[in-house]
Image: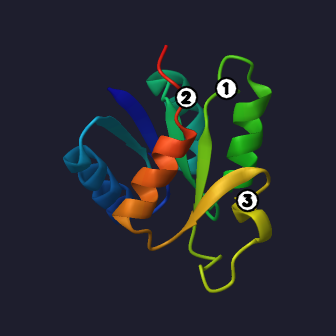
Amino acid sequence: MNKILIIDDEAGFTRLMKLTLQQAGGYEVFEENDATRAMESVRRVRPDLILLDVVMPKMDGGDIAACIRKDSALAHIPIIFLSAIVSEKDPIPGGLIGGFPFLSKPVSLDALIACIRENLPDPE
C-alpha cells in the first residue's frame, strides 16, 4: 500500500483528502497541518509521495520542498504541489511550480488520482 503524506495548514482539507484517498483504495494517508513540523513528519512517515500546499503560515511549500530535496534520505520522494492561488483558468506553463507538478484547489478526485499515479515511483 502506498503511503501519502498531505502537508497543508487547512485541517478540513487534509481530512477530506485523507478520507477521499482512503476510499479510493490503495493508499495509507497521513496528515500534517503545521508547516514547521513538516520535515519531522516526512522523516517519521517516509511517504511514497507528498501532497504539499504552496501557501502556509510560517513556512511555505517551496521552503519545505527545498528542505526535502537537500536531505539525501528524502530527496527521491515525489512532491505534488496543491494551490488555490493558481487556477485552471490561469494555468502555469508546463503545469509545474518550481519543477514540481501541481494541482489547483479545489481538486477533482479523478485529477488527483491520475496525478498521484503518474508521479508514484514504480514498485520494485
Q: Earlier in the sequence, mark 3 or mark 1?
A: 1
Q: Earlier in the sequence, mark 2 or mark 3?
A: 3
Q: Residue furthest bottom?
A: 89
Q: Tell me which amino acid carries mark 2.
A: Pro
Q: Nearer the viewer, mark 1 or mark 2?
A: 2
Q: Secondary structure at mark 3?
A: strand
Cα distance between the residues tagged 1 and 2:
9 Å
Please state if 16 lies on the left or on the right of 103 as rendered: left
Q: Which residue is mark 2?
A: 121
Q: Residue furthest top?
A: 124
Please state if 24 lies on the left or on the right of 3 as rendered: left
- Please give the name of the residue rendered at 69% of the width and 77% of the height, measured from the top-left corner: 91
- Please give the name of the residue rendered at 61% of the width and 30% of the height, measured from the top-left corner: 77
Q: Residues within 10 Å of mark 2 (few under 14, many from 20)?
A: some
Q: Which residue is mark 3?
A: 96
Asked whether the beta carbons under mark 1 and mark 2 sit within 8 Å of each other, the answer is: yes
Q: Residue furthest left?
A: 23
Q: Which residue is mark 1?
A: 76
Q: Secondary structure at mark 1?
A: loop
Q: Tell me which amino acid carries mark 1.
A: His
